[in-house]
Structure formats: C-alpha cells, structure tokens
Image (cartoon, rainbow, N blue to C red):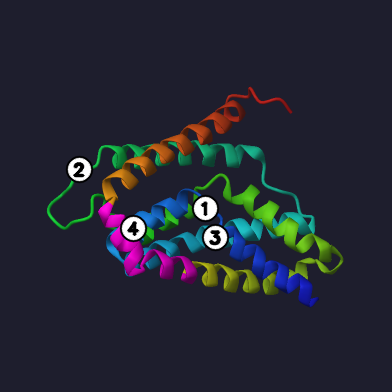
Amino acid sequence: MTQPLLVGAFLAALFYVLIPGPAFLQLLGIGAGQGRKAGAFFMMGHLVGDILWSALALVAIVGARTIGTFVFDLLGLLCGFYLAWIGWSAVTAKPKGDGQALVTVKRPFRRGLIFGVTNPKGYPVALATFTALVAGSAGALDFEALPLLLSVSFLGFVTADLILVAIIGAGAVRRFYRAHERLIVRCSGVLFMGFAAQALWHATPGLLGWRKA
C-alpha cells in the first residue's frame, strides 16, 4: 500500500462530499434553519450512502464486475420522485409561526439516509472522483487493499462532513439564511424539481428499453 494511494483515497472522499449537489442544498436548509445538531444528523445518515457508493466505485476500479444499469435506472426513478416531492414541498411551504423555520425536517437522520442511498449520481460521481485521484497508483490496487482504502475514505467523509456542518451552522450563515429564507427555500425547491426532472429523464429510457446499447 503506497502513501499516494492512501492520500488519493482520502482526498477523493473529501471532494466527493464537498462537491455541491442536492444533498448540499438540503443540508443548507436543515443546518441553517434548525442548527448544527440537525445538520449533523442529516450528514450522519448521508454517510451510509457515501460509504456504499465509494465501496462500489473502488470495487469497480479494482476490476470486479459492476452492477447492471437496471439497478441505477430504478434508483434514478425513485430518487426523481423523491426529489420532486421535496421540491414541491419547498415551493409550497408556508410559515408555521413567528421565529420558526419555513421548512422543518423532523427526522434529519432518516432524510440524510434516504438521500445518500437513493442518489443515482452517487456511483458515477464516486467512480469519477476516485478514479481521478487513485488511478495513478493502480498498480498497488487489489482486493486486499479495499478495507484500508475504505477506512481512509471514511476519514475523508467525516472530515468533509465536519467542515460542512461547521460552515452551515455558523452564526453569520444562519442569520443570512433566516433573512432570506423564503427566497432560498423557493429557489432550492425549483432546483430540486430540476434535479428530479433530470433523474427521471435519464432513468425512464433504460427502464422502458428505449436506451441504445
């Protein structure tokens, strides 16, 4: 096991989490609206998906057979409907009372868990990120190295999660969010619905057999 390979795995996991996407937008709303604790629970749930997709990516890089496209198309369909529901809820959200957040997630851990494991882009993004940063040490990659690589990747995920939670829960960020909460929530809802449309657009042809080989 070479040091560049370990450093590459750590950085791949770090960048995988820090790249903005649907989960980042959801964390912004939860962390800034409900505080660091709720944001931390969301990221703890999302960590399950991070580990799942990175493990599959590393297995694919080592050379194992990858999961068929049907699984990812099905996940894409489910994720599309889920994101559409979240987006519509955000667009139509109404204040629940003075001083209360416009959108409140009662179970942030469960929301993060669902986000993490149903993200159809989790695998390709993880595959691209890990390939870019560990492919240079491909000669040292084998199945015996996977447990250590996953352990290092886990440290990268946790480090990135701590960075995001610290930023999202900062006083200045929370004050800015509260001052412009309605606009941010509405715009985030529209973006979520856009992500949903994109997921459905890519998943439906494969499930219906319309996609060309």
The amino acid sitting under disc 3 is Leu
User: Nearest the camera: 38 or 98?
Assistant: 98
Q: Which residue is mark 2?
A: 94
**Distance CA(mark 3)–CA(mark 2):** 30 Å
The amino acid sitting under disc 2 is Lys
- Identified at 59% across, 65% down, the residue is 14
**For this view, does 14 lie left or right of residue 47?**
right
Stretch of the chain drawn in magenta: 162-179
The question of residue 13 being in magenta is answered with: no
- Identified at 54% across, 29% down, the residue is 201
**Distance CA(mark 3)–CA(mark 4):** 16 Å
Image coordinates of residue 61 in percent, x first then y, are 76, 56
Q: Which residue is mark 3?
A: 18
Query: Callout 3: few (<14), some (14-19), or many (20+) C-alpha neighbours within 10 Å?
Result: some
- Identified at 57% across, 62% down, the residue is 51
Image coordinates of residue 81 in percent, x first then y, are 42, 36
